[in-house]
Amino acid sequence: MHYKEVKAILSPQNGMNLYRGCTHGCIYCDSRSTCYKMDHDFEDIEVKAGAVNLLENTLKKKRRKGMIGTGSMMDPYMPLEAELKLMRQCLTQIARFEFGVVIQTKSKLILRDLDLLEEINKKTKCVVAITLTTYDEELCRKLEPNVCTTRERFEVLMKLKERGIPTIVWISPILPYINDTEENMRGLLDYCVKAGVYGIMYFGAGMTLRDGNRQYYYSQLDKLFPGLKERYIKEFGDQYEVLSPQVDKLNKLVYNTCEEHGIVYDKDELFRYMREYKNNTVGEQLSLFDYMS
Ligand code: SF4
């Protein structure tokens, strides 16, 4: 890891990334793509120096409160966080200034901060988004080698449910000829139903491949699924969007299950929900436009 001095900790849309790079090792990771212009090794994590003070000063000055989002292009609960506790300190500031938060993660380390998530959710709103891709535990270990398995993530979802913290499951990506089976999808959907998730963010049965992540993915296919890279090259060439041959069947299964159990799957609606700030202490509801200023 290495530190980097930064001038700001929140993006104009209130996105907060304390780290850059990721050590979870997902074989399909899009954040490895060269278009993101990372100037260091992906696993050599860049830590934003002074992030907690920066956040404190920023939140103090904000005229309007809103939702803060974290977890895109990295996981805020990488093993490094267990030691540095930057996320925990930032959540303390978020709770203190009565902002809301949306956290995307695959890691059970988030349970360490359950007290703060609960506090934020009581005062305003805390949404946890957990990614699930692979029901089979052994296969999950191969695809996402350095983070807890799907079963453990399901246990995280159940704990959040017990505390009344709303959750959204991202079922993505679905990798052709690997996890694109009906059995896999049924297993994941069953977890979602049991955990009473608010929504499922699903982009269809497929994945994206572009420069940087394609090379890494193919090198992992060679290691884990010999012969599959050649099949991808033959069928998909250098397409950006790579769809599973099971796409129609799997999409239908997801949408029908969501309809049946009252799970929100409309992507626009889910994004709206994650952006909508709510203050329980004053009974006030603010829209996206209120907190963007
Ligand atoms: S958790 Fe996300 S950022 Fe980290 S390796 Fe996996 S896909 Fe990439």
Image (tube, rainbow, N blue to C red):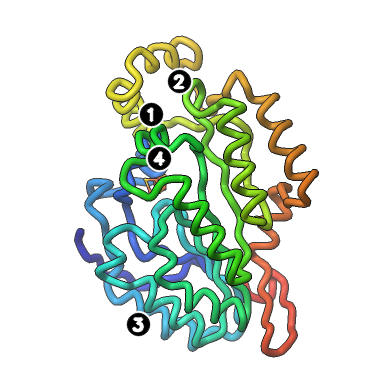
Tell me residue 58's x, y (percent).
45, 81
Secondary structure under tag 2 reads loop
Kindly check if marks 1 and 2 are in contact, taking CB atoms under 8 A apart as contact: yes
Secondary structure under tag 3 reads helix
Secondary structure under tag 1 reads helix
Tell me residue 292's x, y (percent).
62, 72
Give the Cα distance between marks 4 and 1: 9 Å
Eye-nearest disc, 4 or 3? 4
**Mark 3 belongs to which amino acid?**
Asn
Indicate which disc residue 53 carries: 3
Residue 191 visible within the image: yes
Image point 63% across, 35% down: which residue? Answer: 186
Work out whether 147 lies above or below 232: below
**Mark 2 belongs to which amino acid?**
Asp
Eye-nearest disc, 1 or 2? 1
Marks 4 and 3, the one that precedes in the sequence: 4
* Residue sitting at the far left: 2
Category of crowding for the residue at label 2, using alpha-carbon neighbours closer than 10 angstroms: few (below 14), some (14–19), many (at least 20): some
Q: Quadrant of the C terminus?
A: bottom right
Check mark 4 vs ligand 1: CB closer than 8 Å? yes or no: yes
Image point 74% across, 83% down: which residue? Answer: 284
Viewed as shown, does residue 199 lie left or right of 17? right
Marks 1 and 2, the one that precedes in the sequence: 1
Indicate which disc residue 238 carries: 2
Image point 69% across, 32% down: which residue? Answer: 251
Indicate which disc residue 29 carries: 4
